[in-house]
Image (spheres, rainbow, N blue to C red):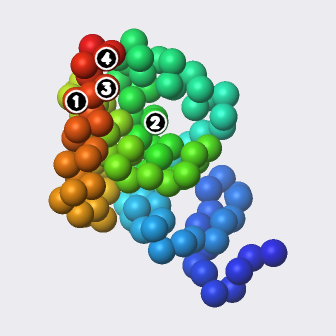
């Protein structure tokens, strides 16, 4: 049953009610950016591939955390993954990072940057 008090967002025929913090997902739909559904198996594989520095895995983790696919929406963690993907040349990651940064306060951005540096110190 759909909550009539919340706007809905549809991905590939599935409709979900939107919460306030899902404004990035709303922008995705407005920009007509394609976002694939990410399942738990794919998410686990992206996490493994990210450890080897694969830019596409870093980017896909950013998508997962920014849209809440398979994980809770977390802009700090999403920013970290997009920042790491952007550092490996993924242009779309730069755009996503900038988009979600608009929804974050300076402390959250600083935390995301700290997490990215910590990750790099472990998984160069």
**Label 1: element kind:** helix
Q: Which mark is residue 122?
A: 4
Instruction: Kindly identify which numbered label has been placed on residue 33.
Output: none
Left/right of residue 9 with respect to residue 49 in the rendered view: right
In the image, 14 versus 110, the foreground residue is: 110
Residue 98: image location, x then y, percent? 23, 53
SS under mark 4: helix
Q: CA distance from mark 3 to mark 2?
A: 14 Å
The label shown at residue 61 is 2
Between the residue at mark 4 and the residue at mark 2, the CA separation in whole angstroms equals 17 Å
Q: Is residue 103 left or right of residue 72?
A: left
Distance of mark 4 from mark 3, alpha carbons? 5 Å
Q: Let me know if residue 21 appears in the view.
A: yes
Closer to the N terminus: mark 4 or mark 1?
A: 1
Q: Mark 1 and mark 3 in contact (Cβ < 8 Å)?
A: yes
Q: Quadrant of residue 118?
A: top left
- Quarter containing the N terminus: bottom right
Q: Indicate which disc, 2 or 1, sits on the residue closer to the N terminus.
A: 2
Q: Residue at x 68, y 65 (%)?
A: 15
Mark 4 crowd level (few <14, some 14–19, many ≥20, 10 Å Cα): few
Badge 3 crowding class, 10 Å Cα cut-off, few under 14, some 14 to 19, many 20 or more, is some
Residue marked by disc 1:
117
């Amino acid at each position: 049953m759909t909550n009539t008090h919340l706007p809905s967002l549809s991905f590939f025929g599935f409709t979900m009610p939107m919460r306030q913090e899902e404004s990035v997902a709303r922008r995705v739909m407005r920009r007509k950016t394609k976002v694939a559904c990410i399942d738990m198996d794919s998410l686990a594989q992206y996490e493994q591939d990210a450890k080897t520095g694969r830019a596409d895995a870093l980017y896909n983790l950013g998508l997962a955390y920014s849209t809440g696919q398979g994980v809770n929406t977390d802009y700090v963690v999403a920013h970290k993954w997009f920042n790491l993907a952007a550092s490996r040349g993924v242009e779309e990651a730069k755009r996503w990072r900038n988009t979600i940064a608009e929804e974050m306060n300076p402390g959250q951005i600083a935390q995301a940057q700290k997490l990215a540096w910590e990750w790099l110190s472990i998984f160069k």
